[in-house]
């Protein structure tokens, strides 16, 4: 028999729109997926306005680097839940807009590493030996052996800027060519450099020492124009430059000038600031060789990135989690499994607090104690925020945009961890502060018994965080509990369970009632006017 969820999955089609050419074999996981009822549409080469016209009902947008996923595209996509990038670079996707709209972006960071590294080495070798230029001359019927005397790679210094997946693979291969490698990456430690057999340097040191320079960073504000006229000035005369990463890391105008001035002997470019780049000034220079963004264009890489991104789409719709998120914390399957049981509890604590307060929340403090403090709790904080914002943002708020939406309204979010949980194996305490109020609630997961709210405003209780609750603040005087119960009975409201807590005899106290009905504002008023009752709130979890 199918579960309700499985029936929903079987009936509701999920539209996957493939906007760039992807490997047929790579999308096989999507094609043969039977449980999810996927409706796969491939429509490539669209202009922005054509894409905007077609995207309204799409659930998943799948792209490579050709399609630019702008804010306008994202805002036109009313059903969009996931953008898949079959490749590494996500500079063609407006990540801020995706996050704001709660759309998860996934990429395929590993699948094309090898191809991009091999392409870099191919470009460097072709550059050193004038292979494209010589081939072109020969094709035109000229046997010219004098103009194309190249240089060896052996014993030359290769400067690598960006020692991530591709940079490291390029270093391995360059060492195979018996080159010396000097590298810069903000995360390259001395130990790692030694392990890789490369010299660690600053960007300027790399520029000054290298005969060949290759860049392998993402295009970020910090890497845009990283190689510019000041940096060309400190390079060796006759240096050769390779860019198989992103157009713009090397300033194109400055590169042009440096080549014309004979400072740079040649450049091999796979990427340009604006693509397609068919009439680029750099292409007019005989010292420049180029390919049209082919670094990842191998059968193997294209299949691999499409398989990875297809599997993440399936995983997302089946489990709500993904392997390669770009705009939310990346957490391993094992680590996610450790915190998943706490997701519901964290969200309920947030939902509880937003129904207790009447003012805008300015600060959120979440404290994780006991076992749970040993885990990566970022997704739990996102769930608590999601609960807190759900009344105002409804289903629009999710794990992807929760923190963004909270910070946008000026909420200050703080996470604390401590291993001591005061008698509980695990304890999550959420505190909110408004201009005039502070409220706290704490919950735990009891082994085999599920979630419990165990403290409200510091009072010890034991409440299942589900259904309709009535939260009553009162003065601890005889008759208060009885009067509340009687008034509710008069309104035909049945009490399922009742918990009471107090700070001291005759002091402040709370009642937490689980009730079978939803109470109206009039019912609340009816209870609130009772003697010794200070505050009454209806809470639905
Ligand atoms: N031409 C192609 O078809 C093609 C194919 C694949 C990847 N790429 C591009 O290659 C680049 C590298 O890809 P990757 O998979 O190695 O990425 P990666 O994330 O594994 O590595 C990028 C590295 O750049 C480093 N970095 C960040 N800022 C830096 C800075 N200011 N200076 C120096 N290093 C910095 C990071 O620390 C990281 O180690 C990306 O731009 C990607 O889009 C191009
Ligand atoms: O889609 C492509 O072929 C290019 C991919 C590449 O630039 C990347 O960043 O992964």
Image (cartoon, rainbow, N blue to C red):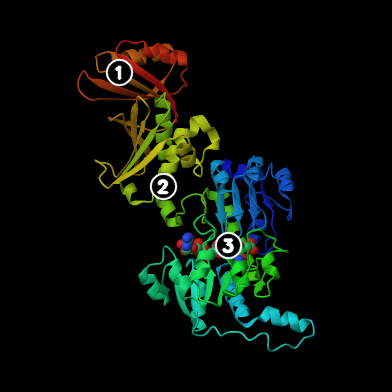
**Residue 315: horizontal and vertical position, in percent?**
55, 53
Q: Nearer the viewer, residue 27 or 83?
A: 83
Kindly report the distance in space between the C-alpha atoms of the residues bearing marks 1 and 2: 36 Å
Mark in the foreground, 1 or 2: 2
Mark 2–mark 3 CB contact (< 8 Å): no
Q: Specify whether residue 168 is in view.
A: no
Task: Pick whichever, 388 or 538, lies toward us.
Answer: 388
Which of the two labelled residues, at mark 2 and mark 3, occupies the earlier sequence position? 3
**Image depth: mark 2 or mark 3 in front:** 3
User: Looking at the picture, how far across and down is residue 66, in whole percent?
Assistant: 67, 57
User: Could you say which disc has been placed on residue 251 in the image?
Assistant: 3
* Residue in view at x 39 percent, y 39 percent: 413
- Circle 3: is it few (<14), some (14-19), or many (20+) Cα within 10 Å? some
Q: In percent of the image, x 48 and y 40: which residue is there?
A: 402
Q: Does label 2 point to a residue whose CB lies under 8 Å from ligand 1? A: no
Q: Quadrant of residue 131?
A: bottom right
Q: Earlier in the sequence, mark 1 or mark 2?
A: 2
Is residue 133 rendered to the left or right of residue 510? right
Which comes sooner in the sequence, label 3 or label 1?
Answer: 3
Residue 474: give its label.
Answer: 1
Is 171 placed left or right of 370 in the picture?
A: right
Name which quarter of the figure residue 432 lies in.
top left
Residue 378 lies, in percent from the top left, at 41, 47
Can you say which quadrant of the picture contains the N terminus?
A: top right
Give how far apart the Cα atoms at labels 2 and 3 are: 38 Å
**Mark 2, residue position:** 378
């Amino acid at each position: 028999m199918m579960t309700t969820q499985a029936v929903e999955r079987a009936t509701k089609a999920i539209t996957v729109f493939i906007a760039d050419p992807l490997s047929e074999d790579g999308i096989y996981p999507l094609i043969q997926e039977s449980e999810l009822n996927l409706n796969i549409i491939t429509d490539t080469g669209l202009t922005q306005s054509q894409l905007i016209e077609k995207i309204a009902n799409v659930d998943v947008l799948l792209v490579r680097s050709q399609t630019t996923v702008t804010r306008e595209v994202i805002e036109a996509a009313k059903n969009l839940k996931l953008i898949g990038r079959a490749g590494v670079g996500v500079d063609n996707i407006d990540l801020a807009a995706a996050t704001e709209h709660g759309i998860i972006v996934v990429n395929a960071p590993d699948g094309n590493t090898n191809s991009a590294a091999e392409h870099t080495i191919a470009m460097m070798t072709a550059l050193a030996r004038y292979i494209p230029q010589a081939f072109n001359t020969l094709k035109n019927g000229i046997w010219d052996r004098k103009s194309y005397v190249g240089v060896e790679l052996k014993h030359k210094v290769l400067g690598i800027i960006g020692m991530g997946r591709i940079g490291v693979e390029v270093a391995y291969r360059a060492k195979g060519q018996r080159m010396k490698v000097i590298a810069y990456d903000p995360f390259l430690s001395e130990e790692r450099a030694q392990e890789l057999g490369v010299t660690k340097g600053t960007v300027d040191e790399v520029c000054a020492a290298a005969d060949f320079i290759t860049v392998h960073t993402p295009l970020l504000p910090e890497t845009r124009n990283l190689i510019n006229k000041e940096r060309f000035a400190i390079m060796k005369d006759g240096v050769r430059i390779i860019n198989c990463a992103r157009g713009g890391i090397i300033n194109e105008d400055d590169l042009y000038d440096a080549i014309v001035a004979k400072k740079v002997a040649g450049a091999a470019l796979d990427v340009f600031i604006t693509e397609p780049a068919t009439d680029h000034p750099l292409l007019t220079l005989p010292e420049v060789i180029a390919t049209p963004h082919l670094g990842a264009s191998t059968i193997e890489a294209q299949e691999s990135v499409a398989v990875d991104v297809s599997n993440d789409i399936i995983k997302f719709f089946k489990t709500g989690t993904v392997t390669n998120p770009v705009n939310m914390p990346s957490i391993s399957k094992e680590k996610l499994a450790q915190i998943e049981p706490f997701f519901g509890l964290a969200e309920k604590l947030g939902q509880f607090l937003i129904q207790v307060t009447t003012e805008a929340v300015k600060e959120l403090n979440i404290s994780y104690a006991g076992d749970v403090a040993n885990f990566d709790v970022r997704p739990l904080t996102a769930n608590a925020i999601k609960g807190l914002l759900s009344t105002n943002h409804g289903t629009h708020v999710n794990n992807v945009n929760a923190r963004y939406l909270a910070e946008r309204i000026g909420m200050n979010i703080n996470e604390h961890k401590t291993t001591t949980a005061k008698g509980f194996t695990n304890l999550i305490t959420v505190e909110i502060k408004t201009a005039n109020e502070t409220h706290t609630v704490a919950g735990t997961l009891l082994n085999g018994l599920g979630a419990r709210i165990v403290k409200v405003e510091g009072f010890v209780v034991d409440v299942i965080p589900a259904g309709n609750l009535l939260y009553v603040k009162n003065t601890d005087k005889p008759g208060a509990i009885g009067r509340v119960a009687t008034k509710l009975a008069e309104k035909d409201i049945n009490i399922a369970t009742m918990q009471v807590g107090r700070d001291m005899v005759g002091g402040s106290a709370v009642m937490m009632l689980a009730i079978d009905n939803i109470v109206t504002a009039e019912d609340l008023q009816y209870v609130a006017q009772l003697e010794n009752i200070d505050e009454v709130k209806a809470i639905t979890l």
